[in-house]
Image (spheres, grey):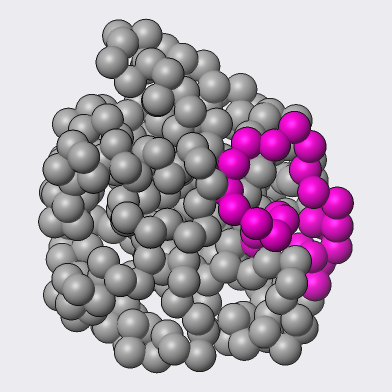
Amino acid sequence: MTRLVKRLTELRTAGEGALVCFVTAGDPDLQTSTKIVLALAQAGADIIELGIPFSDPIADGPSIQASSMRALLAGTTVRGVLGLVRDVRKTSDVPLVLMTYYNPVQRYGLEQFACDAADAGADGVILTDLTVEESGEWKKVAEHHGLNTIFLLAPTSTDIRIRKVAKVASGFVYCVSRTGVTGERTELASGVSELVARIKASTDLPVLVGFGVSKPEHVREVCSYADGAVVGSALVNLIAEYGGSAELFSHLSKMVAELKAGTKVK
């Protein structure tokens, strides 16, 4: 059982939602990213998604696109991100999920990436643009190395696709709350609870909702019908604003504590 599955099981037993915090590894640099991950965990994040920066992040909106570019310009590589994971593991057991696109992992080598990611201390991987139909080779090496594979489902997903994903996903299912790209929103999209219900009808895996979730009230609403919420752009924007300041960590800790309070609604 990965740290990810263990934490989600603990939260479900306690009747509490999960707070997943996304940040882009290497933004503003790998050393600061390590400190950010540890600060997020200490402030109450249940799971942390580490984005491996990619030059063509088609699922991401302006905030995460910009963070990926900052990280790439700072010299961040896949191997460097795995080194970050290894550094975090020296002092923290917070579940870590690597989120990226298929291209960087294919170039690194599927088997080698799975081996190195697991050895560094990652618990799961999200390959945003990997379809379930083309996931066989990756799933084989990921399972061999004990990594969970998380798939995304969206409002456009048919019941047939939901059932396909439910058969091969592990860890949790990532429910994309709206069509389009990531980014802060003032309101949650309509119909999210119905989509979560459709997914839950096909799987017992936890269902976590992301894309557009950015405020404590969003987290509270999502956790009333789903197993957790993923917040990314709001944190990334804070890092962009305070990345070079000593105030960054106090702002991040305050935001995470407020978001985490929204998970305790069941």
102 to the left or right of 107:
right
- Percent position of residue 83, x then y: 14, 49
Q: How many labels does the image show?
A: 0
Q: Is residue 89 visible?
A: no
Residue drawn at x 80%, y 56% is 192
Q: Nearer the viewer, residue 206 or 216?
A: 216
147 over 48 or under it: above or below: below
**Where are the magenta residues, as a range?**
175-198
Q: Which of 111 and 257 is in front in this view?
A: 111
Quadrant where the C terminus is found in the figure:
top right
- Percent position of residue 203, x then y: 67, 77
Q: Which quadrant of the figure has residue 54? A: bottom left
- Percent position of residue 162, x then y: 68, 80
231 over 194 or under it: above or below: above
Q: Can residue 102 be seen in this view?
A: yes
89 to the left or right of 14:
left
Q: Nearer the viewer, residue 76 or 38?
A: 76
103 over 229 or under it: above or below: below
Quadrant where the N terminus is found in the figure:
bottom left
Residue drawn at x 38%, y 66% is 101
Q: Which quadrant of the figure has residue 55? A: bottom left
Q: Magenta span has 185?
A: yes
Q: What secondary structure prevails in the magenta region?
A: loop
Q: Which quadrant of the figure has residue 263? A: top right
Residue drawn at x 70%, y 37% is 185
Q: Magenta span has 265?
A: no
32 to the left or right of 204:
left
Residue drawn at x 66%, y 43% is 212
